[in-house]
Amino acid sequence: MAVADPIITLEGVSKSFGATQAVSNVSFQVMPGRCVGWLGPNGSGKTTLIRCMLGLARTTTGTITVRGHAIPGDVRQALTRVGAIVEEPRFYPYLSGKANLEVAAKFVGGDAATRIDWALERVDLVDRSGSKVKEYSLGMRQRLGVARSLLNDPELLILDEPSNGLDPAGIVEFRRMIRSFVEDDGRTVFISSHLLDEVQKMADDIAIVQSGKLVLHGSVDQLVAEGRQSMRLRVDDPVRAEETLYRLGLVTGIAEGEHGNLELTGERIDDAKAILITRSLVEAGIGVIEIARESESLEQRFLEITSGLPLEGEGEGSS
Amino acid sequence: MISATLRTITGRKGSFLGGTIFVLVMAVIVIVANIVIHELRPGRNPSMGGQGMLDGVGGALFIFGVVVAILIGSLAGSYDVAQGTMRYLVITGARRGQIYAARIVAVVLAVLLMLAVPLALGAILAVTLPHTSADSITSGELVDYVWTAALFAVVFGLISMGIGSLLRSNGPAIAISLVFSIGFTPLLLLLYSLSETLGDATLASSLDRISGGNDGLPIAVAGVSVVMWVAVFLGFGAVRVHRDEY
């Protein structure tokens, strides 16, 4: 596979369960070396599509290519360097963490067994690797799941809600680990999560799915930049300030708050517009007490795009 | 892959270790009973070991070995799907057929491991403990003793694995396997009332024939019949494993 080829390609992928359309005509590509956030409300088809990508479920229509190999036809070749956590990491609870990796390594084959200690070290589980998995916290099982997915030295990691069960410190550590996989190792990470703030910090690109349909796909920076941007001002004369700003025609909405606060909304309030706004106010003799520019967060964009559907709750089942 | 699968089977303390200890305890009870009976009435029971000991231990292993083999086999079939580990085996890139084949071999090995200690203990004590010349044991009888216990346990273990592979939870897998093996298999002998040949082809009759019984199908045909019975259940399980979405 050439470097510039997509590592995942989906073309018109649909998946039905009887009369229920879980995934509907989804097409997109994931380029190598990127961290892609896969977002959607509960029941939107995120996990179903991941299962199709891994050959665990069959698509109803459409084609999936992973690492240049068609799924499910060449699934074995495709998965030789793909690691994954699907729904939640499951293990043999009566075996130790290390024994679970030894079992997995036998199935992976090749030199997977030689990577067990390295993988445990990478997820910081060396000290507890001899304990039975039934004694592990959910966070430890998540890390062990990541360790298992590293056994075949994956080019592509597909992680379904891997942050579930992690405490705040664990989430920060996990984010560092994921970024390290991408930036230091050059791996591609495809990660589904309901922790939108985390995805914003972790992912380079995101894809949003709703009711089985892909509704948005692009870089995180681009998506946030395309969102509504606002500016919050506190002035000594809100009435005159409002008149001045409307005359400028740079803002699409002005909301008046308490204590002289004005909330300005615009399509793209960039640096030049911000300078123009403040300069106009000062030249009009209006005292500017406080000024702050705010971009719509990924979470706000997500809620806007998915029409305010409730977010997936932590620890909930698959979609 | 076989050793890894065997490790997952033998690691289950409840079914494997517990079952193995249970079978061993049953064998020990029979051994102790033989010794006590001999000590209490040596005139009427002149042999402490010998044929009586071999038959007693063989009988215990036949009954309890089959029950534990059913437990081992049905759990081996259902556990990975019930526990959610099956999808992680599949995404290693291993062929589903390979995973299933490794499981078949591992079940056979696990059942034999479960039987090994009590079988050996029974054989050693039967040969070494004092017994009359009339109760002495030939090498052929020792082979029959091992063959019968292992055959029944392995066959029902594999059939139970096939049944377990059709199901997505452990409880029903164990229950249905027990009902089939202990309830339905003897019930099939009613086929004798319809046809001698049909009756001979039942699993119980065919097993009896190849484990030393004198009546029924020619031994080779009985062997094929047993293989067919096992193959049908394992075949259904294989189809399910091959087609299932995880």
Image (tube, coloured by chain):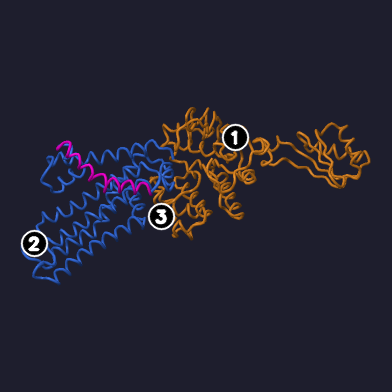
Chain colours: A orange, B blue
At horizontal 23% and vertical 54% (from top left) the residue drawn is B63
> Observer-nearest residue: A176 or B239?
B239
Q: Nearer the viewer, residue B1 or B174?
A: B174
Q: Is residue B110 magenta?
A: no
Instruction: Residue A210: give its label.
Output: 1
Q: Which residues are magenta?
A: B171-196
| Location of residue A275 (image quadrant) | top right
Residue at the disc numbered 3: A99
What kind of element bears circle 3? helix
Quarter that holds the C terminus of chain A? top right
Q: Is residue A153 above or below residue A19?
A: below
**Which SS class for mark 2?**
loop
Q: In front here: A226 or A17?
A: A17
Label 1 vs label 3, nearer the camera: 1
Residue B186 magenta = yes
Give residue B136's mark: 2
Dot 3, how many residues are within 10 Å of its Cα: few (below 14), some (14-19), or many (20+)?
Answer: many
